[in-house]
């Protein structure tokens, strides 16, 4: 007996054929700050301590990231994305980022927030950078269902996806703890990963140089 494919099955088959074509593979990307090793090590020790006391699989070994924007895009647009981010980031002026104490997102996550009153220029820096990134949001949009996510609450995750009973105990302790770290935000990293891969790969590093538009364009041409 002949079995006919449904419309949905045909669409799904067409999608997989389309997405397997060269250049049409989809990837996850995120633009993050380049964090000094000393600061990352402090965060890792906090994660390890929490893991030892509350043994749950919340990724103590995951990368220490402070993201600016997350998005999905196809391989064929990767170079355009890299060029656009380069032109933006080389025009940004380096500034100090201060991490202070702990905060929580009830009832599943604990994180280290960026201090909102670190400096007036620091706040303006984050706002201006987000505004610049939104100017290229069409390039960062895969389709209507996958639009870029611009970070508005800047933070480094310590523990996420916690069961509520574990979160309650851990937050009771960490809400009383203090933490402080500071570093110069002078470079960004563009990260990429493919479906099924938990690790992020660095595909571009851009230094903040406070260059005017004309010099940025010339610098990109020479690169």
Image (cartoon, grey):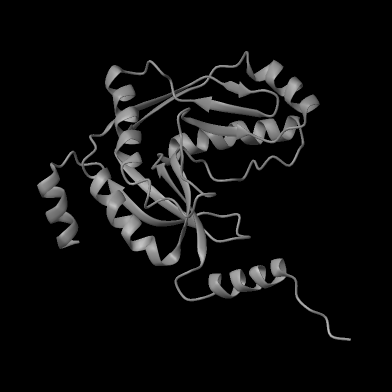
Residue 221, visible in the rendered structure: yes
Instruction: Count numbered badges in the picture.
Output: 0
| Residue 79: % across, % down | 33, 62
Residue at 15% in and 61% down: 222
Residue at 77% in and 31% down: 163
Vertical placement of residue 170 versus 89, above or below: above
**Outermost residue, bottom side:** 1
Which corner quadrant holds the N terminus? bottom right
| Residue 29: % across, % down | 47, 52
Residue 185, visible in the rendered structure: no
| Residue 76: % across, % down | 40, 67
Left or right: where 70 falls relative to 17 = left
Vertical placement of residue 7 versus 212, above or below: below
Q: Nearer the viewer, residue 179 or 79?
A: 79
**Outermost residue, right side:** 1
Which corner quadrant holds the C terminus? bottom left
Q: Nearer the viewer, residue 12 or 62?
A: 12
Left or right: where 223 falls relative to 112 = left
Quadrant in which residue 34 is drawn: top left
Vertical placement of residue 174 versus 143, above or below: above
Residue at 51% in and 62% down: 26
Residue at 76% in and 38% down: 56
């Amino acid at each position: 007996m002949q079995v006919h494919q449904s419309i949905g099955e045909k669409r799904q088959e067409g999608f997989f054929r389309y997405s397997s074509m060269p250049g049409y593979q989809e990837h996850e990307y995120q633009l993050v700050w380049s964090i000094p090793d000393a600061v990352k090590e402090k965060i890792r020790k906090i994660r390890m301590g929490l893991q030892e006391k509350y043994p749950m699989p919340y990724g103590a070994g995951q990368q220490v990231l402070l993201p600016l924007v997350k998005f999905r895009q196809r391989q064929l647009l990767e170079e355009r994305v890299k060029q656009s981010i380069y032109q933006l980031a080389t025009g940004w002026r380096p500034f100090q980022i201060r991490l202070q104490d702990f905060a929580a997102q009830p009832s599943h996550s604990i994180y280290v927030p960026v201090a909102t009153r670190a400096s007036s220029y620091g706040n303006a820096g984050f706002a201006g950078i987000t505004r610049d990134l939104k100017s290229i949001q069409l390039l960062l949009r895969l389709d209507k269902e996958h639009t870029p996510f611009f970070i508005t609450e800047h933070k480094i995750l310590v523990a996420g996806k916690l069961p509520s009973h574990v979160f309650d105990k851990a937050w009771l302790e960490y809400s009383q703890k203090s933490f402080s770290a500071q570093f110069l935000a002078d470079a960004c990293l563009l990260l990429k990963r493919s479906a099924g891969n938990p690790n992020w790969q660095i595909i571009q590093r851009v230094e903040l140089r406070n260059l005017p538009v004309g010099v940025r364009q010339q610098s990109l041409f020479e690169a």
